[in-house]
Image (cartoon, helix red, strand yellow):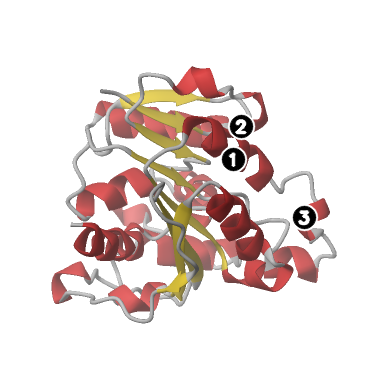
Amino acid sequence: MAAYYNEIDPYAAQWLRNLIAKNLIAPGDVDERSIVDVQPDDLKGYTQCHFFAGIGGWSLALRLAGWADDRPVWTGSCPCQPFSVGSVAHGGAKGQNDERHLWPSFSAIIRERAPSVIFGEQVADAIKWGWIDQVFRDLEDEDYACAASVLPALAVHGAHERKRLYWLAHSNRARREGHQHIERLPVPASAAFSVYGDPIARAWRALDGDYSGLLPSDGVPVAVERDAAKGYGNAIVPQVAAEVIGAYMEIAA
């Protein structure tokens, strides 16, 4: 069955379609509507649903972890702008009062469709705003057991720290469990990737104004990679997410 990708940014949405066409992520449909306009019935027939899909990082992470394309799962990396350090520095962080705080919309769809397992990601600074507490309260009210951990890209030998809050929720209608904190995740050596081959590290430097790491020598104009930096900058690190997924698969086996 097809996957569902919800992504409001047209550039990222087309990126998703290109990845699907190349079979680099699970086959499926891309919906460019805002999540606030998505109705629960719109998701009938989809095995996997990826909200705030970006450039398909979660779908890739699932494949890296050995999660089959036809195995049910939901993912979502809610917008980070209401909670990020960058927004705070520019006076733009409003926390839960920001119109880009879209967890309530995501939560409403979860409540209606009741997926069996959900993986998500957010900037670590969202913890200070009580974001993950709200997420866990809402999910536990729907009989989900929840877990979370702050993990850096360095955990899989990335060339940048890029700490992110990864969380998961497992539907457990039989009994309600409290918060679970993942203290440690095994990272096999095969998960490591090259410092020089890490596009997210290059993009991260580019977002800071350093374009020297972009690669005109590979036939891609620097201007194109500069545009792509936006997509990479908002993306998860799939190798880290794959470790979270793998840890869940071991526990849930």
Q: Is mark 1 in CB contact (under 8 Å) with mark 3?
A: no
The picture quadrant where one finds residue 156 is bottom left
Identified by mark 3, the residue type is: Gln
232 relative to 48, above or below: below
The residue at the point 75 percent across, 63 percent down is 87
Answer left or right for 100 relative to 215: right
Q: Is mark 2 in CB contact (under 8 Å) with mark 3?
A: no
Disc 3: CA contacts within 10 A as few (<14), some (14-19) or many (>=20): some
Name the residue that disc number 3 marks: 96
The residue at the point 26 percent across, 66 percent down is 247
**Observer able to see residue 42:** yes
Name the residue that disc number 1 marks: 106
Q: Position of residue 50 (x, y in %)?
A: 43, 38
Q: Is mark 2 in CB contact (under 8 Å) with mark 1?
A: yes
Disc 2: CA contacts within 10 A as few (<14), some (14-19) or many (>=20): some
Q: Position of residue 38 (x, y in %)?
A: 59, 24
Q: Disc number at residue 77?
A: none
Q: Nearer the viewer, residue 168 or 177?
A: 177
Q: Nearer the viewer, residue 66 or 220?
A: 66
The residue at the point 27 percent across, 28 percent down is 27
100 relative to 152, above or below: above
Identified by mark 1, the residue type is: Phe
The picture quadrant where one finds residue 29 is top left
The residue at the point 78 percent across, 44 percent down is 99
Query: Sequence order check: which comes first, mark 1 or mark 3?
Result: 3
Q: Position of residue 20 (x, y in %)?
A: 30, 30
Name the secondary structure under disc 3.
Answer: helix
Gap in Å between the C-alphas at discs 2 and 3?
17 Å
Name the residue that disc number 2 marks: 35
Quarter of the image with the C terminus is bottom left
